Image (cartoon, helix red, strand yellow):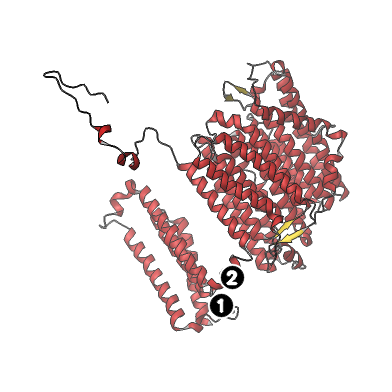
Amino acid sequence: MNIDLNLIFPEIFLSLSIMSLLMIGVFKKNSSNLIFNLSILTLFILAALILNLSSVNKILIFNNSYVIDDVANFMKILTAISAIFVLSISTDFLKSLKIYQIEYPILILCSILGMMVMISSNDLIVFYIGLELQSLALYVLAAFNRDNVLSSESGLKYFVLSALSSGLLLYGCSLIYGFTGSTNFNEIANNTNQVPYGLTFGIVFILVGLAFKISAVPFHMWAPDVYQGSPTSVTLFFALVPKIAATCVFIRFLYVPFVNMIEQWQMIIIFISIASMIFGAIAAIGQKNLKRLIAYSSIGHMGYSLAGIATGSSEGAQSTIIYITIYVIMNLALFCCLFMLKRNNEYFENIEDLSGLSKNHPILSLSLLIILFSLAGIPPLAGFFAKFYIFMAVIEQSMFFLAIIGLLSTVVAAFYYLRIIKIIYFDPSKEKYDSNHSLGLRISLIVSTIFLVFYFTYPNSLLGIISKINII
Amino acid sequence: MIAHAIFFYIFSFIAVISAVMVTVSKNTVHSVFFLILDFISISCLFIMIGAEFLGMIMLIVYVGAVAVLFLFVVMMLNVAHQKNTFFKSTHGSRHIPIGLLVSLIIFFELVIVVGGWKYKPDLINSISLEISEVSNTHSIGYVLYTDYIHLFQLSGMILLVAMIGAIILTYRKREGLKRQSYFSQISREKGDGVDLVDVEKNKGVKIDV
């Protein structure tokens, strides 16, 4: 066995920096600031290292259990970059909650390592190890503000339900191993020419586990409580980064090992997708808390991204990747606005706190307007194009039912986004919020909003990269 | 072959029944006892299919460490509630019979497995098994540090995350805690601690701390 270790250099670099950052943090007193900055630097270098690899074609290493290809590289870079933004905009918030500790960025780096392993996995065992590494770090992050009852509750809830779903996933893995005789994705694909019932059960269990991880209906129950209970910066991380990795794993599972079993999984994915779209649109209407609203809206968005995968075509998977990229940017911008609702070191997270925001904060409310229109999918903003590519791919496979349901639920979902805009612009104004925001927060909001507005002028910027990606 | 089947069904039956009992018994101490019985039955099953390494690991890790720790925790938590019934073996205690039953079953299981293994090695010769010359431990060792090295290292990272998590969720820095410092104790000299003063008559000495 001869492995070119350069291929997994990003992973090795990340693990080594996790350990050295931990050492620095433990032995140097009051080094939270240093560790935060070093973690951001680590992520920059990580993105550069992965970018450096992207010239490599598809390569399998470690006995074909680990794959380096275009999808993996793109998703890893997206993960690293979104984590940079997450870390740089959450420092002020953590300071005000008095949980500005060295372990916070280190746990985020650990979960990113797990996500990178998940994204690159070509084997059931490697996938599971990566999944456990990322979710173990996420459990701790959810309960990070341990003196707060809601945060502890959300950590416990997330831990119990996630452990249950991991159990189901493992059961599915063992069924698949039993019926195909291998844990390797390519071997599984070769051994599934005829499909016994046990194999179908295995697929169902694995899809249940994965749907839980991206909080798709009917396995979404944890999302609103966990999103509301965790510290907002952790909610931001939950809403963005794990979804990237889980979507990539979804694509890889359905397009590599289960590629011959499309009849078995297509109906399941279509059901999950439709249920998430409808539920996400309807359940968000009555929400009063912005974080809960974001949780329901992310359930809906996951439904759209699954619709792309449900086509089973290469274009579908590409449109899903575009969708998840734009989703990440939109949610990042939304959370930036949420972090700006601060008065005297206290953060506000209810929808009524937005009332009349436009009088005192015209720029903030203008960017909120753009972000919410984009989330609702109104042209010419980026969110429209994301949905447009998905529905193009769906209609190309003549799955009209899915497309119609998707469009209708977009209309329903537009209601609650528009309601927030109405509250911002037409309701009586409240007290002014602070306007001394950190540089990272301002830059993140400006960059992401500009991307959302001007995406239509040069859509090839994203489309060109992703259309080159070879899914299979 | 028949003997193999009989033992298989005995162990599986005990494993399933005790797993059910873990969930249905109202007393947590009983639950932990049944959990231990369940683990031991499963490790007997492992040993029967020739995976003696897995079986032993199961015994050492789950029974030896996890379940016993569990038992301690459960007993600690329930001390106030069950002090009267548990620690006095008077009549009215229902722990002793169940504990005895579980330990008797465990004893017989071990007798069966170890006895069969020692004195009748062909007992486990079922068709599905290939008894090779290389032992389990050897063959796991061959692949664990070569083909699966990346998984081995990643498991290490998982344990690191678990450790960090356990520390930040439970460690509380206490204020005003006085710690012993050996260095400053030893390097203390007579001049630091003793002050000789002349005491005036009927006035005393003012000591400032």
Marks 1 and 2, how far apart in space?
Answer: 10 Å
Quadrant in the picture for the C terminus of chain A? bottom right
Q: What amino acid type is highlighted by mark number 2? A: Tyr
Q: Which mark is residue B142?
A: 2
Where does the image place residue A344, in percent across and percent down from the top left? 57, 20
Question: Residue B136 versus residue B49: which sits nearer the camera?
Answer: B136
Where does the image place residue B107, in percent across and percent down from the top left? 38, 71
Image quadrant assignment for residue A90: top right
Instruction: Assess disc 1: are there few (<14), some (14-19) or many (≥20) residues with their C-alpha within 10 Å of its C-alpha.
Output: few
Image quadrant assignment for residue A100: top right
Describe residue A96's horizontal placement relative to residue B105 as left or right: right
Question: Residue A245 versus residue A25: which sits nearer the camera?
Answer: A25
Reply above or below: B181 against B10.
above
Where does the image place residue A256, in percent across and percent down from the top left? 76, 59
Quadrant in the picture for the N terminus of chain A? bottom right
Reply above or below: A20 against A411.
below
Residue at image x 69%, y 16%? Answer: A360
Where does the image place residue A210, in percent across and percent down from the top left? 67, 51
Instruction: Assess disc 2: are there few (<14), some (14-19) or many (≥20) residues with their C-alpha within 10 Å of its C-alpha.
Output: few
Image quadrant assignment for residue B128: bottom right
Q: In the rendered image, which residue does mark 1 sit on? A: B134
Describe residue A351's horizontal placement relative to residue A99 as left or right: right
Q: Which chain is disc 2 placed on?
A: B
Secondary structure state at the residue bearing disc 1: loop
Tell me which numbered mark, 1 or 2, is placed earlier along the sequence. 1
Q: What amino acid type is highlighted by mark number 1? A: Val
Mark 1 and mark 2 residues within 8 Å of each other at the beta carbon: yes
Residue at image x 30%, y 49%? Answer: B83
